[in-house]
Amino acid sequence: MQDLGVQIPDLLIKQNESLAKYTYTKTGGEADLFAMPKTIDEARALVHYCHEKNISLTVLGNGSNLIIKDGGIRGVVMHLDLLDEIVRNETRIIAGSGAKIIDVSRFALESQLSGLEFACGIPGSVGGALYMNAGAYGGEISDVLDAATVLTRSGDLLHLKREELAAKYRKSTIADKDYIVLSAEFTLELSERQPIETKMAKLTEAREAKQPLEYPSCGSVFKRPPGHFAGKLIQDSDLQGFQIGGAQVSTKHAGFIVNVGSATATDYMEVIHHVQETVKRNFDVDLETEVKIIGEDK
């Protein structure tokens, strides 16, 4: 990887970069090489370089629904935070993968476009939201997503239409084929500003009342099991407040695991496993993680 700076001279590169500062849990080890492309061309060149050199490439958004293990990540980590442009074209919004989906929903408000109100409290990036078809309060990204520009792992550029994205609950073609999102196009509806703003304010109030936003966390940890609610199962298992190291099952919302002080990724993993085992024993329900877990054990 010594020649990467020569191959892509303007690429921002850091060696042995701590990844804890890039995750919402504030945990995670180091990346061997950490790269931040400023343009689509740089991102494509980096993907192509890693493919040609057979170097492991991990893509990182803004780390909101992610746990990076304490041993860090080998190879190259590509952070897409700088691909954050948001523009309007009539009733369409085109947003870079590094843009925060919250910012896109606020941009829609300012443009008097309705459809993204549900996303006003989702902390992830556009790329991450597409990857897992993020949703909240009855809405999902797939409801308004019209198209996406992605890279394959060999560096080919693809423009996928809505029907090609095959989004389902917390799944998508992007995740299945491990595409790298560069930008997304959302089709919205013209509206008056006031009803959009009112709905966003109500959703924000509900989120602040229910979610433990005062602590670092990776958001909702588990998927909703069929016929159940993960938080209710955890609460009924008397697990709220259960803690290992600095990772604690939130006393405010049982579906969250929060960092109450110097938690490690290992603490998080141990709490997750304990919750899964306890809920399985009590209710014979398998809790599947919604949070993505990557990296090496320490």
Image: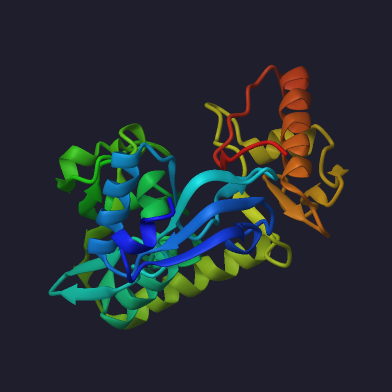
In the foreground, 95 or 198? 95
Rendering coords of residue 219 (x, y %): 60, 52
* Residue depicted at 46% across the width and 64% down the height: 13
Horizontal side, residue 240 vs residue 19: left or right? right
* Residue depicted at 80% across the width and 48% down the height: 248
* Residue depicted at 64% across the width and 36% down the height: 230
Residue 271 visible in the snapshot: yes
- Asked which quadrant contains residue 286, the reply is top right
Rendering coords of residue 269 (x, y %): 72, 37
Which quadrant of the figure contains the C terminus?
top right
Compared to residue 99, the image places residue 109 above or below, namely below
Compared to residue 241, the image places residue 41 above or below, namely below
In the foreground, 294 or 270? 294
In the foreground, 34 or 143? 34
* Residue depicted at 86% across the width and 43% down the height: 244
- Asked which quadrant contains residue 86, the reply is bottom left
